[in-house]
Amino acid sequence: MKKILTILIAFAVAVSVVLPAYAANGKATYSGNAGNFVFNPGSDYSPTDLFPHFKGVMPGDTLTQKITVKNDADNKVKVKIYMRSLGAHAESVEFLSQLSLKVQKSADNEMAYMFDATADETAGLTDWVCLGMLYSGGKVNLDVILDVPVELDNAFQNEIGYLDWEFKVEEFPIEPDDPQAPQTGDDFNVGLWSAVLVCSLFMMILLFAWRKKEKEQ
Amino acid sequence: MGKIKIKIFVVALVAVLMAFISTSTLAYYSTVGKATNVVTSGNIQFIIHETTDQGKEFPKEGVYIVPGDIVSKKVSIESDCEHPFYLRVKMVYGVDSQELSAEDCFKLNIDEEHWVLHDGWYYYTGIVNPGETTPNVFSHVEIVGSKVDNSYLGKTLTLTVKAQAVQSENNLITDGNTHTASGWPAE
Protein backbone atom coordinates (compact mmCIF):
# COMPACT_ATOMS: atom_id res chain seq x y z
CA MET A 1 0.00 0.00 0.00
CA LYS A 2 2.84 2.33 0.94
CA LYS A 3 4.61 1.57 -2.34
CA ILE A 4 1.50 2.37 -4.35
CA LEU A 5 1.04 5.62 -2.43
CA THR A 6 4.69 6.55 -3.02
CA ILE A 7 4.36 5.83 -6.75
CA LEU A 8 1.17 7.88 -6.98
CA ILE A 9 2.76 10.85 -5.20
CA ALA A 10 5.86 10.63 -7.41
CA PHE A 11 3.62 10.53 -10.48
CA ALA A 12 1.60 13.54 -9.27
CA VAL A 13 4.81 15.50 -8.63
CA ALA A 14 6.20 14.57 -12.05
CA VAL A 15 2.95 15.63 -13.73
CA SER A 16 2.84 18.92 -11.81
CA VAL A 17 6.40 19.67 -12.90
CA VAL A 18 5.91 18.70 -16.54
CA LEU A 19 2.47 20.20 -17.15
CA PRO A 20 3.29 23.89 -16.58
CA ALA A 21 6.32 23.61 -18.88
CA TYR A 22 4.16 21.97 -21.52
CA ALA A 23 1.41 24.54 -21.13
CA ALA A 24 3.83 27.44 -21.49
CA ASN A 25 4.47 26.76 -25.19
CA GLY A 26 2.00 27.49 -27.95
CA LYS A 27 1.23 24.60 -30.30
CA ALA A 28 -0.40 24.63 -33.72
CA THR A 29 -0.89 21.04 -34.79
CA TYR A 30 -2.21 19.80 -38.14
CA SER A 31 -4.00 16.50 -37.62
CA GLY A 32 -4.20 15.36 -41.26
CA ASN A 33 -6.86 14.51 -43.86
CA ALA A 34 -7.88 18.15 -44.08
CA GLY A 35 -8.81 18.05 -40.42
CA ASN A 36 -8.66 21.27 -38.52
CA PHE A 37 -5.60 22.70 -36.92
CA VAL A 38 -5.56 22.24 -33.17
CA PHE A 39 -4.29 25.26 -31.24
CA ASN A 40 -2.99 24.93 -27.69
CA PRO A 41 -3.00 25.93 -24.91
CA GLY A 42 -5.75 28.53 -25.42
CA SER A 43 -6.73 30.89 -22.63
CA ASP A 44 -9.72 32.42 -20.86
CA TYR A 45 -9.76 35.04 -23.61
CA SER A 46 -9.57 32.77 -26.66
CA PRO A 47 -9.64 28.98 -27.08
CA THR A 48 -7.08 29.24 -29.88
CA ASP A 49 -4.64 31.54 -28.05
CA LEU A 50 -0.98 30.70 -28.75
CA PHE A 51 0.39 33.42 -26.42
CA PRO A 52 0.22 32.15 -22.81
CA HIS A 53 3.39 34.11 -21.96
CA PHE A 54 1.96 37.44 -23.03
CA LYS A 55 -0.47 37.94 -20.18
CA GLY A 56 -0.27 40.81 -17.69
CA VAL A 57 2.64 42.39 -19.51
CA MET A 58 4.29 45.40 -17.89
CA PRO A 59 6.20 48.38 -19.26
CA GLY A 60 9.82 47.40 -19.94
CA ASP A 61 9.02 43.70 -20.42
CA THR A 62 10.72 41.72 -23.19
CA LEU A 63 9.05 38.34 -23.41
CA THR A 64 9.55 35.35 -25.68
CA GLN A 65 6.80 32.94 -26.62
CA LYS A 66 7.83 29.65 -28.21
CA ILE A 67 5.34 28.17 -30.66
CA THR A 68 5.63 24.72 -32.23
CA VAL A 69 3.93 24.13 -35.57
CA LYS A 70 3.62 20.37 -36.09
CA ASN A 71 2.43 17.98 -38.78
CA ASP A 72 0.59 15.12 -37.06
CA ALA A 73 -0.77 13.65 -40.31
CA ASP A 74 0.08 10.04 -41.13
CA ASN A 75 3.03 8.87 -43.19
CA LYS A 76 1.28 8.91 -46.58
CA VAL A 77 1.56 12.63 -47.08
CA LYS A 78 3.98 15.42 -46.57
CA VAL A 79 2.65 18.94 -45.99
CA LYS A 80 3.66 22.47 -46.69
CA ILE A 81 2.67 24.73 -43.82
CA TYR A 82 2.21 28.46 -44.25
CA MET A 83 1.28 31.25 -41.88
CA ARG A 84 0.13 34.82 -42.18
CA SER A 85 -1.15 37.57 -39.92
CA LEU A 86 -4.59 39.11 -40.21
CA GLY A 87 -3.57 41.87 -37.82
CA ALA A 88 -5.26 43.22 -34.72
CA HIS A 89 -8.98 43.35 -34.09
CA ALA A 90 -10.25 46.89 -34.57
CA GLU A 91 -10.79 47.51 -30.85
CA SER A 92 -7.25 46.32 -30.06
CA VAL A 93 -5.31 48.50 -32.49
CA GLU A 94 -4.68 51.38 -30.08
CA PHE A 95 -3.15 49.10 -27.44
CA LEU A 96 -1.25 46.71 -29.73
CA SER A 97 0.19 49.57 -31.76
CA GLN A 98 2.20 50.47 -28.63
CA LEU A 99 3.92 47.06 -28.56
CA SER A 100 6.66 45.66 -30.75
CA LEU A 101 6.49 42.08 -32.03
CA LYS A 102 9.06 39.91 -33.78
CA VAL A 103 8.64 36.42 -35.21
CA GLN A 104 11.38 34.12 -36.40
CA LYS A 105 12.09 30.44 -36.82
CA SER A 106 13.92 29.16 -33.72
CA ALA A 107 16.28 26.85 -35.56
CA ASP A 108 17.66 29.53 -37.80
CA ASN A 109 18.48 32.64 -35.84
CA GLU A 110 20.46 34.09 -38.72
CA MET A 111 17.38 34.57 -40.85
CA ALA A 112 15.74 37.94 -40.97
CA TYR A 113 12.66 38.21 -38.83
CA MET A 114 9.65 37.17 -40.85
CA PHE A 115 7.76 39.76 -38.81
CA ASP A 116 9.23 42.84 -37.13
CA ALA A 117 6.71 45.60 -36.53
CA THR A 118 4.18 46.88 -34.03
CA ALA A 119 1.85 44.14 -32.87
CA ASP A 120 -1.24 45.53 -34.60
CA GLU A 121 0.27 45.33 -38.10
CA THR A 122 0.48 42.46 -40.56
CA ALA A 123 3.84 43.66 -42.01
CA GLY A 124 6.02 40.75 -43.17
CA LEU A 125 3.21 38.28 -42.59
CA THR A 126 0.66 40.03 -44.77
CA ASP A 127 1.08 37.33 -47.41
CA TRP A 128 1.43 33.62 -46.75
CA VAL A 129 4.94 32.72 -45.58
CA CYS A 130 6.00 29.10 -46.00
CA LEU A 131 7.35 27.63 -42.77
CA GLY A 132 8.60 24.53 -44.56
CA MET A 133 7.76 21.10 -45.94
CA LEU A 134 7.00 18.81 -43.03
CA TYR A 135 6.81 15.02 -43.04
CA SER A 136 4.72 13.14 -40.52
CA GLY A 137 5.83 14.16 -37.03
CA GLY A 138 7.86 17.06 -38.43
CA LYS A 139 7.75 20.43 -36.71
CA VAL A 140 8.90 24.01 -36.94
CA ASN A 141 9.61 26.08 -33.85
CA LEU A 142 8.90 29.79 -33.83
CA ASP A 143 10.16 32.41 -31.40
CA VAL A 144 7.77 35.30 -30.91
CA ILE A 145 9.34 38.22 -29.06
CA LEU A 146 7.20 40.95 -27.52
CA ASP A 147 8.71 44.26 -26.43
CA VAL A 148 6.68 46.53 -24.16
CA PRO A 149 8.11 50.06 -24.10
CA VAL A 150 9.04 51.26 -20.64
CA GLU A 151 7.23 54.53 -21.34
CA LEU A 152 3.89 52.78 -22.00
CA ASP A 153 1.22 55.09 -20.65
CA ASN A 154 -0.79 54.34 -17.49
CA ALA A 155 -3.92 54.47 -19.63
CA PHE A 156 -2.98 51.06 -21.08
CA GLN A 157 -3.32 49.20 -17.78
CA ASN A 158 -5.70 46.21 -17.92
CA GLU A 159 -5.91 46.24 -21.72
CA ILE A 160 -6.71 43.19 -23.83
CA GLY A 161 -5.38 42.99 -27.38
CA TYR A 162 -6.52 40.41 -29.95
CA LEU A 163 -4.57 39.55 -33.08
CA ASP A 164 -5.32 36.80 -35.57
CA TRP A 165 -2.90 34.47 -37.28
CA GLU A 166 -3.84 31.97 -39.95
CA PHE A 167 -2.11 28.70 -40.72
CA LYS A 168 -2.55 26.93 -44.04
CA VAL A 169 -1.56 23.42 -45.00
CA GLU A 170 -1.18 21.79 -48.42
CA GLU A 171 -0.81 18.03 -48.59
CA PHE A 172 1.46 16.34 -51.14
CA PRO A 173 2.03 12.64 -51.83
CA ILE A 174 5.18 11.05 -50.56
CA GLU A 175 7.57 10.49 -53.47
CA PRO A 176 9.93 7.51 -53.71
CA ASP A 177 12.98 9.74 -53.40
CA ASP A 178 11.65 11.53 -50.30
CA PRO A 179 13.61 10.96 -47.13
CA GLN A 180 12.31 8.10 -45.05
CA ALA A 181 9.69 9.41 -42.71
CA PRO A 182 10.15 8.40 -39.09
CA GLN A 183 8.09 5.40 -38.00
CA THR A 184 5.33 6.84 -35.89
CA GLY A 185 3.35 3.62 -35.63
CA ASP A 186 0.25 5.19 -37.12
CA ASP A 187 0.65 3.76 -40.67
CA PHE A 188 -0.98 0.42 -39.84
CA ASN A 189 -3.46 -0.34 -42.64
CA VAL A 190 -6.49 -1.25 -40.61
CA GLY A 191 -8.80 -1.69 -43.63
CA LEU A 192 -6.55 -4.12 -45.46
CA TRP A 193 -5.78 -6.33 -42.50
CA SER A 194 -9.40 -6.34 -41.35
CA ALA A 195 -10.45 -7.50 -44.82
CA VAL A 196 -7.84 -10.25 -44.76
CA LEU A 197 -9.00 -11.33 -41.31
CA VAL A 198 -12.67 -11.43 -42.33
CA CYS A 199 -11.88 -13.37 -45.54
CA SER A 200 -9.71 -15.85 -43.67
CA LEU A 201 -12.38 -16.45 -41.07
CA PHE A 202 -14.97 -16.84 -43.79
CA MET A 203 -12.80 -19.36 -45.65
CA MET A 204 -12.10 -21.30 -42.46
CA ILE A 205 -15.77 -21.55 -41.65
CA LEU A 206 -16.51 -22.78 -45.17
CA LEU A 207 -13.72 -25.36 -45.06
CA PHE A 208 -14.98 -26.68 -41.72
CA ALA A 209 -18.48 -26.84 -43.16
CA TRP A 210 -17.29 -28.77 -46.24
CA ARG A 211 -15.22 -31.19 -44.20
CA LYS A 212 -18.17 -31.85 -41.91
CA LYS A 213 -20.46 -32.38 -44.91
CA GLU A 214 -17.96 -34.74 -46.57
CA LYS A 215 -17.63 -36.76 -43.35
CA GLU A 216 -21.39 -37.05 -43.08
CA GLN A 217 -21.56 -38.30 -46.66
CA MET B 1 -17.82 -28.81 -55.36
CA GLY B 2 -14.72 -27.61 -57.21
CA LYS B 3 -16.71 -24.85 -58.92
CA ILE B 4 -18.08 -23.61 -55.60
CA LYS B 5 -14.55 -23.45 -54.17
CA ILE B 6 -13.38 -21.43 -57.13
CA LYS B 7 -16.33 -19.02 -56.74
CA ILE B 8 -15.59 -18.51 -53.07
CA PHE B 9 -11.93 -17.98 -53.79
CA VAL B 10 -12.80 -15.34 -56.40
CA VAL B 11 -15.18 -13.57 -53.99
CA ALA B 12 -12.50 -13.55 -51.29
CA LEU B 13 -9.91 -12.25 -53.73
CA VAL B 14 -12.22 -9.45 -54.85
CA ALA B 15 -12.85 -8.53 -51.20
CA VAL B 16 -9.12 -8.34 -50.51
CA LEU B 17 -8.52 -6.26 -53.65
CA MET B 18 -11.39 -3.92 -52.66
CA ALA B 19 -9.73 -3.45 -49.29
CA PHE B 20 -6.46 -2.58 -51.04
CA ILE B 21 -8.15 -0.16 -53.42
CA SER B 22 -10.25 1.58 -50.78
CA THR B 23 -7.28 2.13 -48.48
CA SER B 24 -4.82 3.20 -51.12
CA THR B 25 -7.00 5.91 -52.64
CA LEU B 26 -5.77 9.29 -51.41
CA ALA B 27 -6.96 12.82 -51.90
CA TYR B 28 -4.60 15.69 -51.31
CA TYR B 29 -6.09 18.40 -49.24
CA SER B 30 -5.58 21.98 -48.27
CA THR B 31 -6.99 23.55 -45.14
CA VAL B 32 -6.73 26.77 -43.12
CA GLY B 33 -6.97 27.33 -39.36
CA LYS B 34 -7.20 30.60 -37.47
CA ALA B 35 -5.63 31.30 -34.08
CA THR B 36 -6.83 34.33 -32.16
CA ASN B 37 -3.90 35.33 -29.97
CA VAL B 38 -4.24 37.57 -26.96
CA VAL B 39 -1.90 40.02 -25.24
CA THR B 40 -3.05 41.51 -21.94
CA SER B 41 -1.42 44.24 -19.89
CA GLY B 42 -0.97 44.11 -16.15
CA ASN B 43 -1.77 46.76 -13.60
CA ILE B 44 -0.81 48.13 -10.22
CA GLN B 45 -3.57 48.26 -7.63
CA PHE B 46 -3.64 48.55 -3.87
CA ILE B 47 -6.05 49.03 -1.00
CA ILE B 48 -5.54 51.54 1.80
CA HIS B 49 -6.58 50.09 5.13
CA GLU B 50 -7.53 52.43 7.97
CA THR B 51 -8.40 50.64 11.19
CA THR B 52 -8.59 51.28 14.91
CA ASP B 53 -6.51 49.41 17.44
CA GLN B 54 -9.49 47.11 17.96
CA GLY B 55 -9.04 46.00 14.36
CA LYS B 56 -12.27 47.68 13.21
CA GLU B 57 -12.49 49.93 10.20
CA PHE B 58 -11.92 53.56 11.10
CA PRO B 59 -15.34 55.28 11.09
CA LYS B 60 -15.95 57.06 7.79
CA GLU B 61 -17.99 59.73 9.53
CA GLY B 62 -14.99 60.56 11.75
CA VAL B 63 -14.67 60.86 15.49
CA TYR B 64 -15.26 63.63 17.97
CA ILE B 65 -12.05 65.01 19.39
CA VAL B 66 -10.88 67.43 22.01
CA PRO B 67 -7.43 68.99 22.17
CA GLY B 68 -4.85 66.53 23.47
CA ASP B 69 -6.77 63.43 22.34
CA ILE B 70 -4.84 60.53 20.92
CA VAL B 71 -6.94 58.77 18.30
CA SER B 72 -6.20 55.23 17.25
CA LYS B 73 -5.86 55.07 13.47
CA LYS B 74 -3.69 52.44 11.84
CA VAL B 75 -2.89 53.01 8.18
CA SER B 76 -1.39 50.30 5.99
CA ILE B 77 -1.48 49.48 2.28
CA GLU B 78 -2.23 46.07 0.80
CA SER B 79 -1.21 44.94 -2.68
CA ASP B 80 -4.21 44.07 -4.86
CA CYS B 81 -2.43 43.05 -8.07
CA GLU B 82 -0.03 40.46 -9.46
CA HIS B 83 2.96 42.75 -9.79
CA PRO B 84 5.37 44.17 -7.19
CA PHE B 85 5.57 47.93 -6.73
CA TYR B 86 7.21 50.83 -4.93
CA LEU B 87 4.92 52.94 -2.80
CA ARG B 88 4.70 56.41 -1.34
CA VAL B 89 2.10 58.10 0.84
CA LYS B 90 1.28 61.63 1.72
CA MET B 91 -0.92 63.04 4.46
CA VAL B 92 -3.17 65.90 3.44
CA TYR B 93 -4.68 68.02 6.21
CA GLY B 94 -7.82 70.13 5.98
CA VAL B 95 -10.32 72.13 7.99
CA ASP B 96 -13.75 73.46 7.03
CA SER B 97 -12.81 77.08 7.67
CA GLN B 98 -10.88 79.49 5.50
CA GLU B 99 -9.58 81.39 8.50
CA LEU B 100 -8.03 78.35 10.12
CA SER B 101 -5.21 76.05 9.12
CA ALA B 102 -5.03 72.31 9.75
CA GLU B 103 -1.24 72.26 9.57
CA ASP B 104 0.40 71.20 12.84
CA CYS B 105 -2.97 70.23 14.32
CA PHE B 106 -2.08 66.53 14.00
CA LYS B 107 0.96 64.71 15.28
CA LEU B 108 1.50 61.27 13.76
CA ASN B 109 3.76 58.51 15.05
CA ILE B 110 5.25 57.68 11.62
CA ASP B 111 7.14 54.40 11.41
CA GLU B 112 10.38 55.94 10.22
CA GLU B 113 12.10 52.58 9.98
CA HIS B 114 9.96 51.66 6.97
CA TRP B 115 8.81 55.06 5.70
CA VAL B 116 11.29 57.76 4.67
CA LEU B 117 10.28 61.38 4.12
CA HIS B 118 11.35 62.99 0.85
CA ASP B 119 9.79 66.11 -0.68
CA GLY B 120 6.60 65.79 1.33
CA TRP B 121 6.06 62.09 0.58
CA TYR B 122 6.77 59.12 2.81
CA TYR B 123 8.42 56.46 0.66
CA TYR B 124 8.14 52.82 1.66
CA THR B 125 11.71 51.53 1.87
CA GLY B 126 10.94 48.12 0.38
CA ILE B 127 8.95 46.57 -2.42
CA VAL B 128 5.32 45.62 -1.91
CA ASN B 129 4.96 42.14 -3.40
CA PRO B 130 1.69 40.59 -4.56
CA GLY B 131 -0.49 39.70 -1.59
CA GLU B 132 1.61 41.64 0.92
CA THR B 133 0.53 44.41 3.27
CA THR B 134 2.95 47.10 4.40
CA PRO B 135 3.71 47.87 8.02
CA ASN B 136 1.56 50.69 9.39
CA VAL B 137 2.53 54.12 8.16
CA PHE B 138 1.36 55.34 11.56
CA SER B 139 -0.87 53.88 14.25
CA HIS B 140 -2.25 56.84 16.14
CA VAL B 141 -2.91 60.54 15.74
CA GLU B 142 -2.44 63.07 18.48
CA ILE B 143 -4.57 66.23 18.40
CA VAL B 144 -2.05 68.89 19.31
CA GLY B 145 -3.53 70.79 22.24
CA SER B 146 -1.31 73.83 21.86
CA LYS B 147 -2.51 74.33 18.28
CA VAL B 148 -6.18 73.34 18.42
CA ASP B 149 -7.62 76.12 20.56
CA ASN B 150 -11.15 77.42 21.03
CA SER B 151 -11.26 78.82 17.50
CA TYR B 152 -11.55 75.20 16.26
CA LEU B 153 -14.66 74.59 18.32
CA GLY B 154 -17.33 72.94 16.17
CA LYS B 155 -15.05 72.68 13.16
CA THR B 156 -14.19 69.56 11.16
CA LEU B 157 -10.55 68.65 10.76
CA THR B 158 -9.64 66.14 8.08
CA LEU B 159 -6.63 63.91 7.61
CA THR B 160 -6.53 62.26 4.19
CA VAL B 161 -3.98 59.60 3.28
CA LYS B 162 -2.98 59.75 -0.37
CA ALA B 163 -0.91 56.93 -1.88
CA GLN B 164 0.85 56.37 -5.19
CA ALA B 165 2.67 53.33 -6.56
CA VAL B 166 4.98 52.56 -9.42
CA GLN B 167 6.05 49.16 -10.72
CA SER B 168 9.34 47.77 -9.44
CA GLU B 169 9.76 45.32 -12.34
CA ASN B 170 12.08 46.70 -15.02
CA ASN B 171 12.62 49.65 -12.66
CA LEU B 172 15.77 48.99 -10.67
CA ILE B 173 17.03 51.49 -8.12
CA THR B 174 20.77 51.60 -7.58
CA ASP B 175 21.11 53.56 -4.36
CA GLY B 176 18.39 51.86 -2.29
CA ASN B 177 16.27 55.01 -2.22
CA THR B 178 12.87 54.19 -3.63
CA HIS B 179 12.18 57.84 -4.41
CA THR B 180 14.78 57.55 -7.20
CA ALA B 181 12.68 54.95 -9.05
CA SER B 182 11.39 55.98 -12.45
CA GLY B 183 7.77 56.66 -13.21
CA TRP B 184 6.42 58.35 -10.08
CA PRO B 185 3.26 60.15 -11.19
CA ALA B 186 3.27 63.90 -11.33
CA GLU B 187 1.50 65.45 -8.34
Image (cartoon, coloured by chain):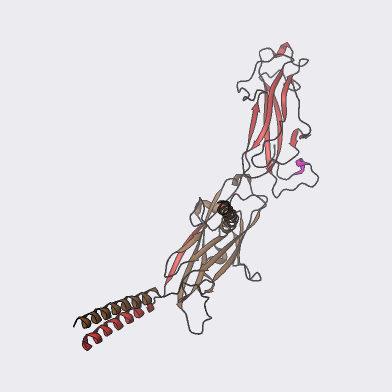
**Residue A184: where, in percent of width, then height?**
50, 72
The quarter of the displayed image where residue B161 is located: top right
Q: Quarter of the image for the C terminus of chain A: give it.
A: bottom left
Quarter location, residue A103: bottom right
Q: Is residue A207 left or right of residue A107?
A: left
Judge whether residue A127 can be spotted in this image.
no
**Residue A40, placed above or below residue B127:** below
Image hue for chain A: brown
> x, y (%) of residue A46?
49, 53
Q: Colour of chain B?
A: red
In this view, the residue in front, A197 or B69, is A197
Who is closer to the viewer here, A168 or A93? A168
Residue found 31% across the figure and 78% down from its top: A199
Please state if A198 lies on the left or on the right of A188 as rendered. Answer: left
Percent position (x, y) of residue A24? 58, 57
Q: Is residue B180 magenta?
A: yes
Residue under the point 59% across and 65% down: A142
Quick one: which residue is furthest to the right in this view? B175
Query: Magenta span covers which residues?
Result: B177-182
Q: Residue furthest top?
A: B150
Q: Residue shown at 43%/74% (left/top)?
A: A188
Q: Is residue A27 visible?
A: yes
- Where residue B180 sits: x, y (%)? 77, 43
Note whether B83 is above or below B144 in the view shown: below
